């Protein structure tokens, strides 16, 4: 069975998205040797059944807390087929450094632009299609509590899983061509991505939430 891991900063909506994907059938347990809780469940993506793992909040792949260390160990020591990087859309630009770190580590990645409603309320919106083109990975806008965007997320997960070849360990360590090496490359992408993030104060919710 494929394994999908939700990763992101604390309080961005990972657990709400996890519950939306897995329903009620989740098992919560302490990560071995720690007091940090990790939830695991199963979810159907089309006809594909996959394990979904909800991780403790992490800001970077360089752990500075027990929670971050657990997330890192989980990413490195389990066979991870796909990472869903869940971000608070309001803080998209700050979150992208973890996105790039995950890409450079070779993870197959989907960027989940959660809290799209709150960003919209602040007059911010994201050109999701343009961001996808800039980053070279699928990006899906969601609103966890209402489930808006979750069917689309499931569809994109299904498509990504069906395109995976070989084992997770083979997929890991393969550097996607879209990611420039080194910090300079990250910064140039960050600057370019900023143009994907624009203020649309005054636009109607229908306009700003449509892709
Ligand atoms: N407005 C809004 N609130 C959200 C959204 N997703 C999650 N929340 C809320 O944000 C808080 C943190 O969510 P949680 O899933 O626990 O975040 P986690 O720490 O990343 O697992 C909860 O109160 C959620 O109800 C969203 O898309 N929009
Ligand atoms: Mg959580």
Image: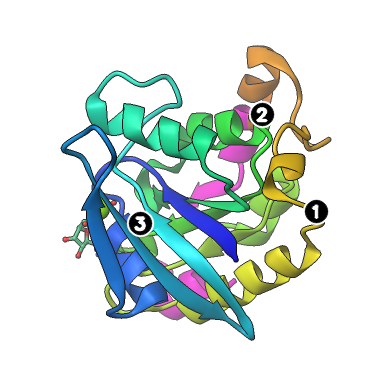
Quadrant in which the N terminus appears: bottom right
Q: Residue placed at 16% from the left, 37% from the top?
A: 35
Against 195, is 189 above or below? Answer: above
Q: In which image quadrant can residue 183 be found?
A: top right
Mark 2 closeness class: few <14, some 14–19, many ≥20 residues within 10 Å: many
Asked if the residue at label 3 sits under 8 Å from ligand 1, the reply is: no
Asked whether residue 107 appears in the rendered view, the answer is yes
Separation of disc 1 and disc 3 at Cα?
38 Å
Q: Is residue 122 left or right of residue 4?
A: left
Q: Residue placed at 61% from the left, 21% from the top?
A: 187
Furthest residue to the front? 33
Residue 88: percent from the left, percent from the top? Answer: 36, 50
Count how many numbered circles sit on residues in the image.
3
SS type, badge 1: loop
Looking at marks 2 and 3 on the same chain, the residue that comes earlier in the sequence is marked by: 2
Mark 3 closeness class: few <14, some 14–19, many ≥20 residues within 10 Å: many
Q: In which image quadrant can residue 74 be found?
A: top left
Separation of disc 2 and disc 3 at Cα?
27 Å
Residues drawn in magenta: 190-211
What residue would you read off at disc 2?
104
């Amino acid at each position: 069975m494929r394994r999908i891991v939700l990763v992101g900063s604390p309080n961005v909506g990972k657990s709400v998205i996890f519950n939306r994907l897995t329903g009620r059938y989740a098992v919560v347990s302490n990560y071995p040797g720690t007091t940090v809780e990790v939830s695991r469940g199963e979810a159907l993506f089309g006809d594909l059944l996959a394990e979904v793992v909800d991780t403790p909040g992490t800001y970077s792949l360089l752990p500075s807390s027990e929670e971050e260390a657990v997330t890192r160990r989980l990413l490195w020591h389990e066979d991870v087929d796909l990472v869903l990087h869940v971000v608070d859309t309001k803080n998209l630009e700050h979150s992208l450094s973890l996105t790039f770190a995950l890409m450079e580590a070779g993870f197959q990645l989907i960027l989940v632009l959660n809290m799209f409603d709150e960003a919209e309320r602040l007059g911010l919106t994201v050109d999701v299609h343009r961001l996808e083109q800039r980053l070279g990975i699928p990006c899906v806008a969601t609103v966890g509590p209402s489930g808006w965007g979750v069917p689309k997320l499931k569809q994109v997960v299904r498509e990504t899983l069906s395109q995976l070849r070989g084992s997770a360990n083979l997929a890991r360590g393969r550097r996607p061509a879209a990611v420039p090496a080194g910090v300079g490359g990250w910064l140039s992408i960050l600057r370019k991505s900023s143009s994907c993030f624009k203020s649309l104060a005054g636009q109607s919710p229908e306009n700003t939430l449509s892709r």
